[in-house]
Amino acid sequence: MEKDLFEPIKQYFEVQGYTCDGEVRDIDLYMERGEEHAAVELKLKLDFRAVQQAALRQKTVDTVYIGIFMPKNIYSRSFRDKTYLLRRLGIGLLGVSKRTGKVSEILPPEEADLSAFRRRNRKEREAQSLEFSRRTLKSNTGGVHQEKLMTGYREDALLVLNAALGLSGKEEYEKGCPAKAVRDASGVARARQILYDNHYGWFTHIGTGLYGVSDAGRTAAEEYRSEIEALKEQR
């Protein structure tokens, strides 16, 4: 229960010279040390409501913590994402061991500068911009899940598929289309890699450097006919 967090965290701050008490105008743990006012929100788990309540406490006190039982997933990406929000807000996080009652400061109550995060995530920022620039159609709907997205890679693969289909109908390529010919016909610089990877199962490897179109590829060509035509017009 949340009240089981109260005593160990209260003692943790009393050792640091704070005078503490519980339920001061709905604040779980309120404390003062000289002119400093601080608060701790006691929660069984770190969720949006915990963050929301802690942020609201910042309106009236100098320092705010959230106190939880020490989580098992402290090194998981999900937990790191939650602590990122706390760092941006300048909210501290305390963990209490269920076994020993020991209190550990997981995160200090210090507001982190956004520019520092952006520097550390520069590669992801560049990857986002690159993926956006590679998309010609920009036809996806946001907020969807488990649907086929029209990525830059899929757009290139569709152009490669269309080129391979066109070449396979010619007599000189009846034994397979050379990757170079597909690249030249599609205008896709990474056509050879797309053929080799065969990520969508649209192609068949016939021989060294020779490729054909699978039944799945012919089906995809019909399914994406309008997208292929739009891509050909805009590239």
Image (spheres, rainbow, N blue to C red):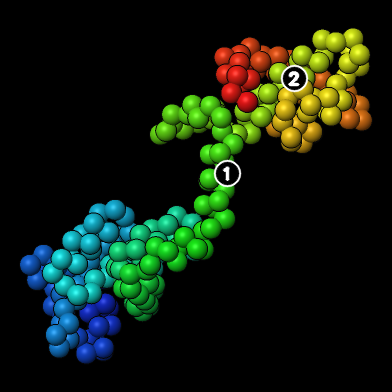
> Mark 2 or 1 closer to N-term?
1
Residue at image coords 76%, 15%: 165
**Percent position (x, y) of residue 123?**
57, 55
- The residue lying toward the viewer, choosing from 165 and 77, is 165
- Count residues near mark 1 (Cα–Cα under 10 Å), then give few for <14, some for 14-19, many for 20+: few
200 left or right, relative to 173: left
Viewer-side residue, 62 vs 93: 62
**Relative to 25, 28 lies left or right:** right
- Residue at 65% of width from left, 17% of height from top? 220
Q: Which disc, if any, is residue 163? A: 2
Judge whether residue 73 can be spotted in this image. Answer: no
- Judge by depth and name the residue closer to the eye, 42 or 171: 171
Question: What SS does tag 2 mark?
Answer: helix
Label 1 sits on a secondary structure element that is: helix
Residue type, numbered disc 2 = Ala
Residue receiving disc 1: 130
Could you tell me residue 152's position as x and y percent? 60, 34
Up-down relation of residue 125 to residue 40 (above or below): above
Location of the C terminus (image quadrant): top right
Where residue 180 appears, as percent x and y from the top left, is 84, 29
Residue ID at (57%, 48%) = 127
Q: Nearer the viewer, residue 203 or 229?
A: 229
Above or below residue 157? Residue 27 is below
